[in-house]
Image: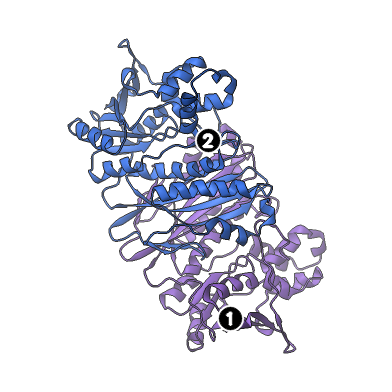
Chain colours: A purple, B blue
Amino acid sequence: MRLGDFGEFGLIARLTENLETRPDVALGIGDDAALLDPGPGMLVAATVDALIEGRHFQLTNSTPEEIGRKALAVNLSDLAAMGAEPCWALVSLLLPTALAVETLDGIYAGLRDTAQRFGVAVVGGNVAATDGPLTLDVVALGRCPRGSQITRHGAHPGDVLLVTGSLGAAAAGLLVARDPDRAAGLAQSLREQARSALVSPTPRVEAGQALASHQLVTAMLDISDGLASDLRHLCVASDVGAELDESLIPIHSAATAIASRYGRDSLALALQGGEDYELLCAVTPERQDETLATLRAVGCMPAIIGRLTMPDAGMTLRRMDGTIERLPIRGWDHLRRDDLV
Amino acid sequence: MRLGDFGEFGLIARLTENLETRPDVALGIGDDAALLDPGPGMLVAATVDALIEGRHFQLTNSTPEEIGRKALAVNLSDLAAMGAEPCWALVSLLLPTALAVETLDGIYAGLRDTAQRFGVAVVGGNVAATDGPLTLDVVALGRCPRGSQITRHGAHPGDVLLVTGSLGAAAAGLLVARDPDRAAGLAQSLREQARSALVSPTPRVEAGQALASHQLVTAMLDISDGLASDLRHLCVASDVGAELDESLIPIHSAATAIASRYGRDSLALALQGGEDYELLCAVTPERQDETLATLRAVGCMPAIIGRLTMPDAGMTLRRMDGTIERLPIRGWDHLRRDDLV
């Protein structure tokens, strides 16, 4: 069946049947607006991000479930980067009327799966028909105790930089998706790790909340545009410079293997490839060990990657041979549509 | 200049420069998520609605400013229908790269205008390029004291039904937009009233808050799909029936004149035309006069239009001649794309 065969209200009923809720949802789907109770002393964190077919996902490379999971996950990653607890989501769908309802069912199954895993209630949304590509525009709302939020602008020169996991696998997955033939002969497990990093990222929700609740880090953001580009955001917001150490940057093994096969520089995948959805944090040297231990305790494999410097030093990269060069910045630009890698 | 000539971050900087804020915005645009302080004892109201070029607006019939105003206004109307105070908005833009930046500037000028008028801070959003039509997906967040919210499900048989203003002008505006030649000779002021109702509706924010703060109404929603269709939502949610009185339904004078010129039934425009964005309320007979006075005090021209009945009576229409018939229900369906009128 195609979506055009359903009415708007029939489709909404189908998609929202038996959605899980939370005790702090005073009113969920079915009225003019949802009503949410953040609780005393809580700030509400709000973010929105869209996934567009052909630009952010391909129905040929992702299952519908993966698309649904990612649409929510990229937003939860933004909440994680504030140290917020994800609580509620609204889902705005732009639907080609020729879309098979089974595809939408799959997308919603993925959305529900991620929502359930992270304790998020889907409390509202919108459906509209479009002559354009399938688009999932997801709003995620969370909460954090006033004063415990982590922004991009609290870091200082001398702070240590760390990431919550290895980088480059999503960019490697994009290389394979664009030219699959060249990957022939690579171990299936490597290819699947790269594909999975691209189409089904895991937001570092537990890590972000753990760091915030212990007030361990001075600044934090998620790596969605690419390490170099996102580091620049941190440097601008905190008015600091940064020196990354090539030997410390954790490159995902799938990125290393695939970069080699595709004649690419694996370091570039880690620095400029987007969509890794790890967290980038600044921490004072005194709290570095506690921070690493906290991250390991929630299942991350964190790595120190450099340190912050005075702002006039700019952003630099210390190469393996000890030379220091300007950090090349090129990340994902949603309007220019540059190649990621 | 076209959007493709701008980078993502350059465009965001251009659009968000000098946006007004509110004291309860702990963190606005420029981080992973916005942080908002609803205050003690407050529920957060959340809603999202998309406007798509070619479906919800035409660049040939609306100015960019009107498009921006409407994109926010339709969401503020949903908050008004809860009796909530509109506070914050997030704007997700899906942009054809060939769009002229001046068009987007105009849209943002309209957004800012409506935001300023209703005291709303734009605290976040997203920009993405699309191969599809220009789409504005707006999230509006508001707040209301816990316990003062008005939902769709508090009405009872015997309650009086009222609307906050006259109906049908937006549907009349759509008639003219689709076949402008036929409107030749109609007074320019009538045509402009109808066009304006369609492309630049006024959300009943003050009215909704006034009704909620005095706990005057038992149920409320905004008329976006059409009076008959939205009344059905109220009847289903509150488990009541309804009888509308044809002689009481306030039909906008532009709807009457244009319906006559186009050979249409003006009552049908009022009953089935969508996008009027007036509020539909149920009130106990004892509080009817106080409710009408409250609405007049905030500049509305309210009208009693009927009453609620037992659910098994269904939804009926008492005609001018005293006969009673089933209320014809046909409203805007976002997937089937039925004609509005």
The chain ID associated with circle 2 is: B
Do the residues under discs 1 and 2 have CB atoms within 8 angstroms?
no
Position of the N terminus of chain A, as image quadrant, is: top right
Query: Which quarter of the figure has residue B272?
Result: top left
Q: Which residue is mark 1?
A: A311
Question: Mark number for residue B334?
Answer: 2
Asked if residue B238 is positioned above or below residue B44 in the image, the reply reads: above
Q: Closer to the camera: disc 1 or disc 2?
A: 1
Residue visible at 59% across and 20% down?
B181
- Left or right, B132 with respect to A300, comes to right
Binning the other alpha carbons within 10 Å of mark 1 as few (below 14), some (14 to 19) or many (20 upward) gives some
Q: Foreground residue, A295 or A92?
A: A92
Asked if residue B340 is positioned above or below residue A204 in the image, the reply reads: above
Can residue B244 be seen here? The reply is: yes
The chain ID associated with circle 1 is: A
Query: Which quarter of the figure has residue B35?
Result: bottom left
Residue A300, image x, y percentages: 55, 75
**Circle 2 sits in a helix, a strand or a loop, which is it?**
loop
**Circle 1 sits in a helix, a strand or a loop, which is it?**
helix
Residue A87, image x, y percentages: 42, 59
Can residue A303 be seen here? The reply is: no
Residue visible at 44% across and 66% down?
A84
Residue visible at 31% across and 31% down?
B301
View extreme (left): residue: B286
Residue A320, image x, y percentages: 73, 86
Residue B178, image x, y percentages: 58, 25
